[in-house]
Image (cartoon, grey):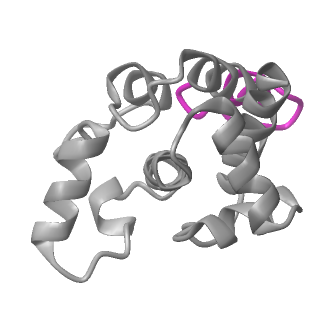
């Protein structure tokens, strides 16, 4: 069952990349996945990851993905009211870049500290790569 839940979590993360807003809660991410929040939390429990860490991972990937599309800094796209909160988020998640150099989704996945479950990260990377190589898609650095 854990392999199935890791795939479901990865699919939810990748679906969140297409949202016009950054997912902020487990409810937001479960809505993107099309399931109840309790179901999403059960997937996380079965995969031995904390749901909040999955949300943080999705937030960082969304910011990096949107930044590459908009030519902005990922730090500027995350909705944190205080710089200290953003700094703590970045310290937990791995670098989002300094604004002068772009961080690719692949590099971020390799350096992040949020989701240590290698299958979720690997499946997320695979889905991002498949998405970016699909018809009519521009590359997103997967």
Q: In this view, does 34 lie above or below 137?
A: below
Q: Is residue 122 left or right of residue 127?
A: left
- For the N terminus, the image quarter is top right
Front position in the image: 4 or 86: 4
Q: In this view, does 23 lie to the left or right of 112?
A: right
Q: In this view, does 82 lie to the left or right of 22?
A: left
Give percent across and percent down for residue 91.
18, 45
Front position in the image: 75 or 47: 47
Q: Can residue 65 be seen in this view?
A: no
Q: What stretch is highlighted in magenta?
A: 128-142
Q: Where, by quadrant of the figure, is residue 136 drawn?
A: top right
Front position in the image: 12 or 127: 12
Q: Is residue 24 left or right of residue 82?
A: right
Give percent across and percent down for residue 80.
29, 75
The number of numbered badges drawn on the structure is 0
Give percent across and percent down for residue 87.
14, 58
Residue drawn at x 51%, y 46% is 50
Q: Can residue 69 be seen in this view?
A: yes
Question: Residue lying furthest left in this view?
Answer: 84
Residue drawn at x 24%, y 83% is 81
- For the C terminus, the image quarter is top right
Front position in the image: 38 or 63: 38
Question: Residue lying furthest bottom in this view?
Answer: 81
Q: Where, by quadrant of the figure, is residue 130 drawn?
A: top right
Give percent across and percent down for residue 104.
42, 30
Type of secondary structure dominating the magenta stretch: loop
Magenta stretch: residue 130 in it? yes
Q: Where, by quadrant of the figure, is residue 85 drawn?
A: bottom left
Q: In this view, does 81 lie above or below 40?
A: below
Magenta stretch: residue 6 in it? no
Residue drawn at x 89%, y 31% is 135
């Amino acid at each position: 069952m854990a392999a199935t839940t890791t795939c479901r979590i990865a699919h939810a993360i990748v679906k969140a990349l297409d949202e016009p807003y950054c997912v902020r809660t487990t409810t937001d991410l479960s809505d993107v996945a099309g399931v109840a929040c309790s179901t999403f939390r059960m997937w996380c429990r079965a995969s031995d990851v904390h749901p909040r860490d999955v949300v943080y991972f999705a937030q960082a990937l969304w910011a990096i993905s949107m930044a590459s599309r908009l030519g902005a800094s990922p730090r500027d796209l995350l909705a944190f009211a205080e710089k200290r909160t953003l700094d703590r988020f970045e310290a937990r998640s791995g670098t989002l870049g300094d604004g002068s150099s772009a961080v690719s989704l692949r590099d971020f996945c390799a350096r992040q500290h949020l989701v240590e479950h290698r299958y979720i990260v690997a499946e997320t990377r695979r889905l991002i790569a498949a998405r970016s190589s699909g018809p009519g898609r521009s590359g997103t650095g997967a």
